[in-house]
Each structure stands twice: as structure tokens, then as C-alpha cells.
Image (cartoon, rainbow, N blue to C red):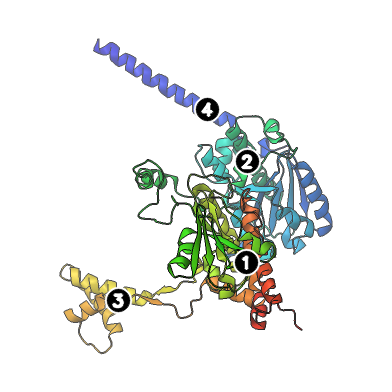
Amino acid sequence: MIMSKLKIGVTSVVALGCAGITYVVLQRLREKNASDALNYLTIDIISSEQDCDQAIDKLRRKCWEHHAIGFDCEWVTEQGRRQPVALLQLSTFDGYCALFRLNQIKTIPKALQDLLQDETIYKVGVAPKDDARYLSQDYGVYMEGTLDVRHLVHLCGYESGGLASLSKSLLGIVLDKTWRIRCSDWEAEQLSERQINYAAADAHVAIRIFIKLINDYHRRGIVSWFRIRNGNGYWKDMDICKRYANVSYNAKLDVKKNDKNSNHRSKEREGKSGKEVESKRYPHATRSKPLYHNCFLEAPDGELLCTCDNNKAMWYVTKALADVVSEDPLKVRLRFEPAGRSVGDVGRYYQLTKENKCVVCGAKDSYIRKNVVPREYRKYFPEIMKEHSSHDVVLLCVACHKLSNMLDRSLREQLAEQCAAPLGSHGNSRIVEDTDCKKIRSAARALLSRKHVLPEARRKELESVILQHYLLHDDVTEELLKEAAQIDVVYENEDYESHGYKVTEYYRSNEGLLRLEEQWREYFLKTMHPRYMPELWSLKHNEERLTVRLKEGRLSEEDQKLLGLYTGY
């Protein structure tokens, strides 16, 4: 009996082993080297501006169906320093690849620049945002529509990785990633055949992976998905792509961390009624109360001035500055003449009632205040621009708020480069760490806690660190060690200027602060495509409001120059 069971067990193990070997062999048979799998590619090498236009026409014509092209860049690294991008690769799904030798062209031609900045055509790859940043640094071109395929890999439930591992696991194509080709001379007078095939393959497998993931996500054929039209005859919105366009993969939230804390968050967000309420730990995370109460504030003669919240309306009443005209809806009439009255559309905006819902998707169950013009810039605006700032406060649901904040990073980076205003993560820190003091503190704490177990040589070395700083002492006493153990290792950077401050100062001296404000509004509309913005919401709201003041003689010449309204007399 025992022997028969052992035989069965051994047989099962052997069978499983054979099955495993068979699976591995079949996988290997399915895999093909890029040179064999991609032998259908048509590759054009572009070395002059004259050749560029024709290549761009081909790319645009061939990507019309998918609205996406594979994208990659190559450069030379010398002594650890990256040289300007030498080669830019673009590929369409049908196998056309254009390799632009930027080191020979010396610039990015207008046709290529327009394609890179066309937000309706997605430039897909692994970490395309990084390559886009290099192109911006080297050639002053700000790309739009980059899309990291790893977002879609995660969305579809596959294991993430680099381009080579994704190509192998998703397409069965093994890319040539030996260091000799990756680190070869991309600025050479003539590229080798191996370099050309390598560069074209990187761009092409990116678009192949993108199309596969899109179709896996939608579980339908390429043609049927891309050719669905809505009632108005426009292309079906690629919402899945809009969600991740221009978003770095590393900026995505850690899903495992979110899952780990989701139970805790859900308890915070559920009140006794089971509805979402404000978190006690993060009181501004979501709103359970409406932002807009739509109470009415009137001038003494009964003319409507604006809508406002209950607290503001009742403040005037409690200060004996106004009277309640009606309670439902709450209407309050001032007892004094206000400084100004509503004029034109800019004035009518403040008279309109507003809905408590996400301006992007229309969700009404929970929402967060979104500052279209971030506070890090607005706080440096003059008071005259801070008045009526409610125009730039809108409501977003939690998901749209997260996405909008991620997308804002792109414009911040652009402003950082344009205005020489590095972000906090680029060495521009308010607090600086003194490495010498840190060594002193570490040495003192080691001597205090482990002096008797330290080797003699190590103890003398640590004492030497202490005495080099405290030059007036000849011996390391316990009192000196206690003082050194509490030494400050960080200090405030006297040269620190915040990113927001430097950006606003740049616009004060150049285009005017109104332009910076409008730029953020334009960016919000372009990236989020809100469908429920308040009526009469305007890109030039402050300019229109201050122009009214200017005509009324209530704007100084200094303010006009500051805001960019001054034209001289």
C-alpha cells in the first residue's frame, strides 16, 4: 500500500515536472528576437529639416486611427553627464518608424515640434515624461500627451517592469538590451544597422504594448474600439488615456499602501449614518457640508450684489450692518453703500447661484475645494488680486482632485524651468543639513552610549572628530559629549526663495501676474476638461474685473504695471 502511494506520488511529481518543462519550452518557442519578430518595419532616418516634414506627414497619416505613436529617445553619456538628446524615435502601429537625428539637425523642426505638442496624439512608452523633460531642457520643446504604458499595465493587472521585460511578457518579443548597444555612440556620423534596429524596435514595441493593453482593457478588437463614434460623430473619448496623460508613473499612489490603510480610512469617512463625513485627522480632505449656500446679499436700494454663504451674510446682521429681508432663501440687505456694484458679466458671475458638485464629472456625494491657481503662487499676489478669489475655487470629487493635483506637477515643472525657480525636491530647500555637525553629533552619541565597548582606535577617532570642532578643549569630557550630542545639525537656508515666490517675481517683471493666473486656468481646462464649470467663469476674470476698476479710476498706476495692464499715457 505504502509503495503504491509512493509510486503514485513520484508519478505525479514527474508529471508536474514534465508539464512545467513543456510550458517553459512552449514559452521559449513563442518568444522571438526583435530582429526576427520586427522584420516588417519601415525605417526612415531623418538628418535634415527638409526630410522632417515628409516624415511627420507619414506619422500623422498612419496614426489617425489610434491617435498614438511609440516614443523614445537616445543620448550619449560622458563621464557621468548626459549630453543633449541625439536621437528621437517615433513609430506607428503599422510598422513605420522615423528616427530623427537631432544632433545633426541641431534643432527640432516646426513640424516635429507641433506633433510633440499635439495633445490629441499620445506619445507612449516607458517613462516618456523623463524623455520629454530632457527634450525640454535641451531644445526648449514642451511635449504634451505623454503616456507611460506602465499605468495601463497596472490597470490590466499585469506585472510591471521595464520596456524589455514588458515586451517579452506581453508580446513575446526579446529586445536587444546588451550594454554595448545601449551605451553606444548615438552621435556617430553614421549609425550602425544594429543601432538603427535597436532604436526603431524600442519605439515600435511601445505602441504595440499600448494597443494590446487598450484592447485587453476593453475586451474588444482594435478597430471596433477605436472606431466607435458618439451621437455627434466625434471620436469616442479615450478616457482611460486622458486619466494618465502627462502623469509620471512614479507619481502614482502606492496601491498596496492604499489597500493597507483603506479599512482605517473607511472608518474615518463613515459617520453614524453611514454617509461620508469629514475626517478628524484630515479635516479638509472631503466636505460633508455644501460649499455654496447661495444666500443673497443686497445693496441698500435692493440691488443684488452677490451670493454668499450663511456665515458671511449673518456676520453683517450681527454687526448691525445689515437686515434680514427673507429667511428662505436667506436674503440680507446692507445698511451702507458698498465700495462697488456689479458691472457686466464679471459682476453677474457673483450674483449666480452655484451647484455643489464636481465640476469635472458632476459627482455630488463628496467633494473637495480645488484652487485652480495654487496657493503657493496666489499668496504672493497683491491684495487687489486676492479679492474675490472665490472665482478660482471649484469643487472636485476625490478621484478628480487626486488626478488634477498629479497633473499640476507638469505645469509646475515647466514654470520651474522657465522662471529659474527650482522645486523643493531640486536642492532648493528652506532647511539645510550640516554634514559636519551631523558627524559630530553622531560621534558624541556613540561615545556616550558605547564608549566602554568601542575599540581603542575607534574611540580615539571619534574623540578626534569632537576635538576638531571644539578647538578650545584639550580633553573630551562627559559634559562636552553631552553638549555635542545635542548640537544642531540643520539650519535655515538664508538664500532660500520658494518656488512660488520666484515664479511670481518673474511674472511681475515680465508678463504680469494676470498672465500667470490665466495660465493656470487654461491648464485646468485643458487637462481636466470640466463639463460643469459655473456659468460666466472666465479665463480673464481678474483682468475684466480690474479693467472696470481702472475705468472707474480706482486702480493706481503702480498696480497697473504690476498686473500687466499698464499701457502708458
* Residue 110: x %, y % from top left: 78, 59
Outermost residue to the bottom: 472
CA separation, marks 3 and 4? 60 Å
Q: Quadrant of residue 420?
A: bottom right
Q: Amino acid at mark 2?
A: Phe
Residue at position x 71%, y 78% in the image? 566
* Residue 469: x %, y % from top left: 30, 83
User: Under tag 2, what secondary structure?
Assistant: helix
In front: mark 1 or mark 2?
1
Q: Amino acid at mark 1?
A: Glu
Location of residue 300 with respect to 222 vertically, above or below: below
| 509 vs 1, nearest the viewer | 509
**What is the quadrant of the N terminus in the image?**
top left
Report the side of 137 relative to 365 (left or right).
right
CA separation, marks 4 and 1? 61 Å
* Residue 352: x %, y % from top left: 61, 56
Q: Earlier in the sequence, mark 2 or mark 3?
A: 2
User: Under tag 3, what secondary structure?
Assistant: helix
Which mark, by number, is residue 210? 2
| Residue position for label 1 | 517
Q: Quadrant of residue 422?
A: bottom right
Q: Amino acid at mark 4?
A: Val
Neighbour tally class for label 1: few under 14, some 14-19, many 20 plus, Cα within 10 Å = many
Q: Earlier in the sequence, mark 3 or mark 4?
A: 4
Which mark, by number, is residue 9? none
Image marks 3 and 4: residues in contact by CB distance under 8 Å: no
User: Under tag 4, what secondary structure?
Assistant: helix
